[in-house]
Amino acid sequence: MGWLVIACLVPGIVGAALLFFHEYREGRARLEKDTIQTARALVQAVDAHLLKAQVAAQSLSTAGALSKGNFADFQQRATALLATTKAGSNAVLTDQSGQQIVNTLKPFGQALPRHGNPAVARRIFETGKPVISDLFIGGLTQRPVMSIDVPVLSEEKVAYVLSIGIEPKDFSGILLAQRLPESWVAAIFDTTGTIVSRTHNADQFVGQKGTAEYIQRFQESQEGAMETITREGIPVFSVFSRSAVTGWTVGIGIPRQALEAELQHKFVTLALGMIAVFGFGAMLAWLIGDRIAVSVRALQAPARALGAGGPLPASEVHIKEAAEVLGAMSEAENLLEQRTASLQSTYQSLLLREQELLEAHRLGRFGIWQWNAKSGEITVSEEIRHIYGRDVPPFPEQRGTLLSIESWERVNAAAQEALKTGIGYDLKLQAYRNDGTHIWIHAKCEAIRDAEGEVIALRGTVQDITERIEAEKALRNSEIRFRATFDQAAVGMAHVSLEGKWLHVNDRICEILAYPRDVLLGLTFQEITYPPDLHTDLDYLQQLLVGSIPSYSMEKRYVRRDATLTWVNLTVALVRTPEGKPDYFVSVLEDIQSRKETETALDEARKLYRQHLEQQVAERTEALMLANQELQRLALQDALTKLPNRLAANERLRQEFLRLKRTGSPYCVLMMDIDHFKSINDTYGHETGDHVLQHFAATVAGTLRATDFVARFGGEEFIALMPDTEIEGAMVSAEKVRNAIQAESFPVVGQVTVSIGVGLARAADANEDETVRRADAALYCSKKDGRNRVSS
């Protein structure tokens, strides 16, 4: 019974071992798939951050301040945009020489270095297209940085390069947002394999290359996994995903020790559970087996008694089958007693026929046997012993040992029938050799009668037909499997002649190609292949025929019976004869029409979405430019006089001062103040005062040159900037203005006078304010000397 228990448990133990192995592989595969999805999500987040910066850069590149050369205003706007969008750490404007003009990291006007990545700048000036750079050392910060560089166009030519710098620390938030386990190592690489950001030891490794093996792997494949070692020397299982848009890569490394510890924990838990289950099963099997063993052992004494021909002793059994066997033994005992007398009478006759049976055995090469009905003795030829590999036991002992139980029952019934009727049997039976292997035998039997017609014995032949039965069975199973696979396959299957004629097709291929079977079998595949795809298909077939390839797969189109096209994935292999000559092709067709239609629909949807998005961006950009222009106009214009205001005057003064520094071209400033303007407001009211200001502004602007710049500087104070003018010319122009104002008749008030101070800009001035202060001091002198006069 111990062997019975072991036989019950061994399959379960083997199955549990296979389950453990399968669970390990599945767990590893799930982890790899989940980690690749995480890497893919990180790549998309990195792309989104880079493209966000690119959109911000393109928005800034259209600012009106750039087209007007107002770099100070541009720096203010760029600083505000970066603070709002968080698109990058700084913005840089570079001219064609590579010199930085604006860098939001330093106040406008301070000295700046050249562009930190001149190769990228030259590329944009040459191509006019945006560039996402790799990591480089910033020209100003001297720290690792990458940039989004876009062209700034003027009259359809690249005038400047606008760059938005992004520091490695800006990418750290993307990695930390995934909340990876603390021991996992995640890193972002640029297109050259340089580490841009890292969850561990970022200060040490950012700016360095990844391992050569790792870089080579992710440059060859867009996604994948591999065993590798981190820069710290830690063995890890690493997965990576490379962006198809930016070419940047995200890698995630899982320490091999942590990975194996987690899987081992799962397997130990599963193993303990299985051990508990198997232990309980073993105990239960042992208890049941013990009851079976007791019952089987109880049959030993009756069996021995039955074999000895003595009376059966009383025996106690616990299972139904053992009780039935005991009953059969009792019946057999009675039957044996009845047949003993008959068998004794035929014994002599059987001895006489023995020589005849031996001759038949020699000639027919069959094993022969004879059974004495009276004595129960079985005589067999040597060939039968060879067939079974053992001596043949008495017939009752053959049950389950020499013959299978089912075969023994059939033989027993047939033998009993032969004894009763004298009609023999012709049976195919399953038997066992001495080594336990199964064999098939062809058993024939005929009855032997005595002179009175009584059946006194049975004799027959036994032929080992195992090889024939197995061959027939294998052939039938093979044919059934092939036919079921061929006819019921979910894909189209066909046998095709070497000339291309359809030889055999299943129902699915008829559905795919929309041809009835009888019509399709009358065609060749060349006749229904879409012509543009035929050359590739025939080329593959030729490679099959010459043995260059074992099989091939391709996507192709067939012309259906209704003249429509259908897409399939075609897989073809060549079947050869035993001599190695080409015989026919086996083709498998998978219907991919729905997938192709879906791909086409997705492409159209992407195209429409891209067009819509581009239109929205263009519309919003145009609206933003118009709004910026309007804001700029309102910010730089005095609402009452419609002249430029003080802010506009300060910008113009700055431009003229820079031009003076650059070219040496002189300019003068006129500071003008309406005399006794407060008394006008006090006497006539502020509305009249406003009219005086408007009239005064129009008169001054009409008197000076068109190239001169006139602005309201504050209250009743006005300023005029006269470019390319020395002090003598400015004094003459100031007198013209004074005379024009004095001669002008103002509404309600009548005559108004003006005091004017003239200042000349000097090359040694530190800034533009010094000229204004000189003009203001001269204005003070004019007022002190009695007003309505010009001083310098």
Image (cartoon, rainbow, N blue to C red):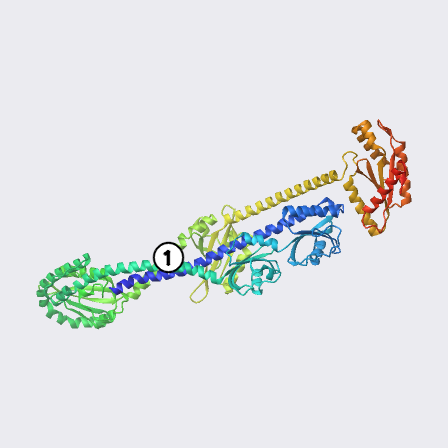
Instruction: Say if residue 457 shows up in the picture.
Output: no
* Total numbered labels placed on residues in the image: 1
* Residue positioned 39% across, 60% down in the render: 268
Q: Amino acid at mark 1?
A: Arg
Residue under label 1: 481
Q: Position of residue 404 (x, y in %)?
A: 24, 62
Q: Which residue of the protein is positioned furthest toward the front in this rendering?
A: 784
Is 713 on the left-hand or right-hand side of 289?
right
**Which of the two residues, 579 or 405, is positioned nearer the viewer here?**
405
Estimate the x, y position of residue 348 in percent, counting from the top left. 10, 70
Residue 684 lies left or right of residue 403; in this view the side is right
Residue 578: x and y in percent read: 42, 66
Between 689 and 734, the residue placed more toward the observer is 689
Mark 1: few/some/many CA within 10 Å (<14, 14-19, 20+): few
Q: In the rendered image, which quarter is residue 466 located in?
A: bottom left
Kindly tell me whether residue 6 is visible in this rendering.
Answer: yes
Query: Where the N terminus falls, by quadrant?
Result: bottom left
Left or right: 755 as drawn, with respect to 119:
right
In front of the other: 735 or 17: 735
**Residue toward you, 326 or 86:** 86
The C terminus is located in which quarter?
Answer: top right
x then y, percent, for residue 284? 26, 58
Dot 1 falls on a residue whose secondary structure is: helix
